[in-house]
Image: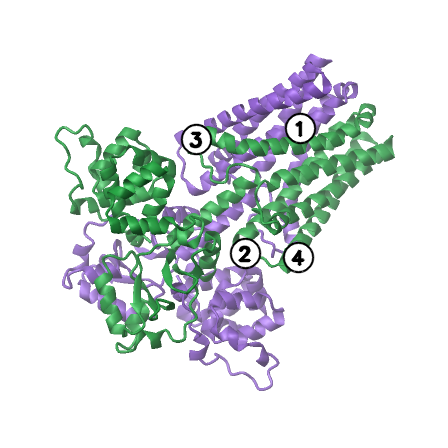
Chain colours: A green, B purple
Amino acid sequence: MKDEESGISEGRGRRHAPHEDMPAGDPCAGLVDTDTEYAHPADVAEHIENLSLEKQVCVLRNLPAEDAAEALAELDEHVRVDLLENLDADVAAQILAEMSPDDAADVLDELDEDHRDVLLNNLDTEDADEIRHLMAFDPDTAGGVMNTEIVILDEQLTADQAILQIRREIEDKENPYYAYVVDIDDRLIGVLSLRDLLLSRPGVRLRDEVGNQNVISVLFDQDKEEVAHLLGHYNFMAMPVVDYEGRILGVVTYDDIFDIIQEEASEDMLGMVGAAQDETVDTPWFESLVKRLPWLVVNMLNSALSASVVYMFEGSIAQMAILAVLMPMVANQAGNTGQQALAVMIRQLAVDRFDSRKSWRAVAREGKIGLASGVIMAVLVCAVIWAISGKGALAAVMGLALLCDMLLGAVAGGSIPLIFRALGRDPAQASSIFLTAITDGAGFFIFLGLASLLLL
Amino acid sequence: MKDEESGISEGRGRRHAPHEDMPAGDPCAGLVDTDTEYAHPADVAEHIENLSLEKQVCVLRNLPAEDAAEALAELDEHVRVDLLENLDADVAAQILAEMSPDDAADVLDELDEDHRDVLLNNLDTEDADEIRHLMAFDPDTAGGVMNTEIVILDEQLTADQAILQIRREIEDKENPYYAYVVDIDDRLIGVLSLRDLLLSRPGVRLRDEVGNQNVISVLFDQDKEEVAHLLGHYNFMAMPVVDYEGRILGVVTYDDIFDIIQEEASEDMLGMVGAAQDETVDTPWFESLVKRLPWLVVNMLNSALSASVVYMFEGSIAQMAILAVLMPMVANQAGNTGQQALAVMIRQLAVDRFDSRKSWRAVAREGKIGLASGVIMAVLVCAVIWAISGKGALAAVMGLALLCDMLLGAVAGGSIPLIFRALGRDPAQASSIFLTAITDGAGFFIFLGLASLLLL
C-alpha cells in the first residue's frame, strides 16, 4: 500500500533536497522540469517512459531519492531494468533504500545476478538483509508479493496503549489503519482496525478484544492468484500472510491485487491462443516471436492432422469439388461455437473456485447451448443450400455435419479447460489451438465421411 | 468499502436479535445453523447459493437484518433477484435499509419495476430518496458505482476539530480513514487521511493543511472502466467523484474496482468470440443461446463469403484435389497468428490508455512478428511438402500463400481493436469473428489464386 493512496499529490519534491549535489554545468540540469516535482509518482513514471535512456538517467539522478523511488516502483519492467543498469550503483542504492522492501525486492529480482549483488552491497546491512529475506520467497506466492511494513501489537497491550503505539509508528508504516495482534509466540490471533481501537474501552486488553475473532489469513507459499481470489471474495483491504506456525510475516494489499487480477486476465487471454503470457506491446518483438513460434508449430502440426483427414477423402473431393467449398464452413462455425464455450469457462475459472459438480453442470450447459444453436444453424444452412443448389441430399449432409460438429465444439470448449486443470496444466494455455484441432479434424471427417457415404 | 475489510469476522449474529420474531413451529427454524452466524458474509452468501430457493428464503428471513444485508450484497445476481421476489416486501425492505445505499441501489436496479416500487415504498422516505438519487446514475459510470457514506470536512475546521468530527461519525461511515475537505460551496479542495490529521499541528486550519494539494478526482459521468484504470494507475484506495461544479458526490473504492476489472476482462474475452459479455456458467442456457446466436449467424455469413471465394476456384479444385487438403492449413495458421496479435492488443487496451503513436508502433511490432514467423513457417512447410510430394511448384505456392496470409493476419489482428475503437465500438466485440473472416477469405483467395495461375 502506498502513501499516496488517499488521492493526494503534495509536491514532495519541495520538501527534500536532491539526494545528490548537482555538479556545476551538469548537462541534465534543465531536464527536471518543475511540473514533475508536483506530479504524482505514477505520472512521473509515465513521463520518464517517454524519454530517451540518457534523459531517463538524468531525471532519476536529479529527483529526490524518495520521489525517484516512488517513480521507479511504477515504471514498466523493461524500462526499469535498462535504467538501473545505467545508473551509478550508489545512486541506485540510495533510491532502493527509499523503496518499501517488497518493491525493492521485486525490482532487484528483475536484474541479472551481477547487478543485483553490486546494488545489495551498496545498501546498508539491515536493508540488504530484509530485501534478501523477501527475495527468497517465490514471486508467484503470497510471500513474494507481501508487504512487511505493518503494525504488530502484543496481545497484552490495552486499547489505549495500542493507540499510542500506532501514533508512534504512524510515520514509518505504509498503512497504519490495521494492526495485527500476536500472542507471546508471535502467532497472529486477531486483526484490529484503528476504528475498532477508537471504539474500544481504553483499558480493555487486546487479547480480550480479539477473543472471538476467526482470523482469515493465507500461508506464505499460497499462490498469489488464490490470494487475489480470497481478497476479492472477502473485500479485504489487506490479507495477513502467516508461516506454518501461524506467525505473521506481512500483508498482501489491495493495490497488489489490482496488478495480480490484470496479469491473470492477460495470461488467460494470451495463453489461450499461444502468445507469451506476460507479453505487452512493449515486449521486444524478437522475444515475442521466440515465445509464440512453438505454439505456431503445434498449431501447424494439428492443422496437418486435419489436412490428413481431408487427404483421406481426396477422391471424393475430386469427384465433387463443392465439398471443398462447404467443408471450411462446418469447421469454422464449430470452432466459433467452441470458442464461446471456452471463453466462458476460462473466465469462470479465473473468478471462481469451481467444484466438480458445478464443472459438469457447466459443461452440460454448454452442450445444451451447442445442441440448440447447432439445430438452428443446421436448419438454416440446410434450407439455404437446398434453395440455391436444389440438392437436397447435399443440404442434408451439410446440416447434419454442422449440427454434430457444433455440438462437439461446445462440449470440447467447455471441457478442455477443466481437463487441462485436472492434468495440473494451466486451463487456458493453448486451449484455443487444441479446440480448433478438434473442431477442424472432426468437422472435415464427419462432413466428408457423410458425403462419401451418402452422395457418391 | 465494507466493514469487514480488516480481515475479521466476529460473529455479528451473536450481538443482534433476529429482525423478526420467529413464528412458533416455523418450518425453517432448523435451517439457520449456528456456524453460519459466525461466518463471514461472503461465506454465508456462498452457503445460501447452494440451497433451494425455499431454504434460501428461510435463511435470509431468520438472519439478523444486518447480516442478511451483507450476505445479500455478495450473492450472484440471478440468485438475488429470485430471492428478493420471493421474500415478503417488509422483510426485504428491512434488509435493504441495512445495506449501504449504493449496494441497495445496485440490487434494486436488477429487479423489475413493480417489485422495485413495492420495496421502495416499504422503506422510510429518507432512505428511499437516497437510493432513488443513486439509481438515477448510469450504472456504468463513476456515479453508478460510487459510495456516498464518506466523511466531509469544512475547510474552516482545525485539525483537532476534524479528528473530533471523525470520531463522532466513525460508527456510521464505511471508511473513516479518509476525509474530504470542501470549501463553502461544497467544492472538493483536498483529501486528508486520518494519518495526515494525526501528524498535523492541532490548531492548523484544514484549508491551510490542504493548500498545496492537486486533488485527483473523476466526474460522476466518467466510464467506470476509466475510473478503474485511474485507481490502478495511482494505487488509490478510493477515488473522489465530483459533479461539474467540483462538488463532492461520493467515492469509488478499491473493492468496487476488483469487480470492475474482472468484469472488463470477462467482457473482452467473451466479447471477442461473440458470447454475451456478462455471461457466467450460472446464466440460464437459453439466455446465453439468444445472445450468442446473432454472432453465430454473422460468423456463418462471413464463412459463406470465404466459401464463395473457394467456389470461384471450384474448377481448379476439381482438377487438383490436393488444393482442398492444403487450403485449410493456410487459413488456420494465419488465423492463429492473427489471434495472438488480437489478444495482445485487446489486453493492452484494457490496462493502458494508448495514444495513436503507440498504437501504430504496436501494429508495426505485430507486423514484424507476423513477417518473421511467416517466413519461418513458410520455409518449414514448403520444405516438408516438397520432401513428401516432390512437387516444388506446389510447395512454393503453399509457402508463399502462408507467408502472405500470416502477415495479413498479424496486421489485421493488431489493427482490428484499434479500428473498432476509432469507430466508437467496443474494441473486443466479435473481433475474433471478423479476423477469421479476413484470414480465411484472403488465405483461400491467395492460395487458390496462386495455384490456378502457376500450377494449372
Q: Badge 2, how many Cα within 10 Å: few under 14, some, many 20+? A: few
Horizontally, is B364 left or right of A129 in the view? right
Q: Nearer the viewer, mark 3 or mark 1?
A: 3
x, y percent for residue B241: 35, 53
Precedes in sequence: disc 3 or disc 4: 3
Precedes in sequence: disc 2 or disc 3: 3
- Disc sitting over residue A284 in the figure: 3
| Chain of residue at mark 1 | B
- Disc sitting over residue A361 in the figure: 4
Q: Badge 4, how many Cα within 10 Å: few under 14, some, many 20+? A: few
The answer to whether B268 is drawn above or below residue B255 in the figure is above
x, y percent for residue B47: 55, 68
Mark 3 belongs to which amino acid? Pro
Mark 4 belongs to which amino acid? Arg
Report the front residue among A184 and B20. A184
Mark 1 belongs to which amino acid? Met
Precedes in sequence: disc 2 or disc 4: 2
